[in-house]
Amino acid sequence: MTKEIRRILESVPDPEIPAVSVVDLGIVREVSADRVVITPTYTGCPATHTIEQSIRAALDAHGFADVAIETALAPPWSTDWISDAGREKLRAYGIAPPPKGAGASALKNAQAAECPRCGSMHTEEVSRFGSTPCKALWRCKACAEPFDRFKCH
């Protein structure tokens, strides 16, 4: 039963980045026969309610209306929880994923990001504020394209 629930959740897109699922991003922390535990990318994430509604709708549509959805804020979500498949989907969508194992390291945020368009490491952060609160705006100096990068946390 938990495999079926997880399969259903793998089809629930993140509302802000529809190229990845809530499972890809590591928002889904635990799946059991009676509950799904989620952790938003940060405690003030404006998409949390939408994510809960999307998960509820998907579970209900597949006959799992009795499965509870709980939100856990501790430990806080980490970019380390993004799956390898999720990192590749982000890159294909034009968002530079954080380096693997970056976790809460602020130093990793300042390091050059690989351009998701041309692969160059000749990049720079333009603004700590990107299209959503969990991303920063970067620019590639090689192809001159702007892109978002997930902030490490």
Image (spheres, grey):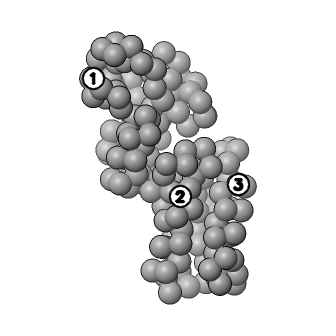
Q: Residue at x 34, y 16 (%)?
A: 143
Whichever of labels 3 and 2 marks the residue nearer the N terminus, that label is 2
Identify the amino acid type marked 2.
Val
Q: Position of residue 28 (x, y in %)?
A: 53, 63
Q: Residue at x 46, y 26 (%)?
A: 147
Q: Position of residue 80 (x, y in %)?
A: 39, 49
Residue 141 versus residue 94 in the image, above or below: above
Q: CA distance from mark 3 to mark 2?
A: 11 Å
Identify the amino acid type marked 3.
Thr
Answer whether residue 152 is visible to the viewer in this image. Answer: no
Secondary structure beneath label 2: loop
Query: Seen in the image, is 10 located left or right of residue 53?
Result: left
Q: CA distance from mark 1 to mark 2?
A: 28 Å
Q: Residue at x 35, y 46 (%)?
A: 88
Residue 72 versus residue 3 in the image, above or below: above
Identify the amino acid type marked 1.
Met
Please tell me the numbered disc located at residue 121. 1
Q: Which residue is mark 3?
A: 50
Q: CA distance from mark 1 to mark 3?
A: 35 Å
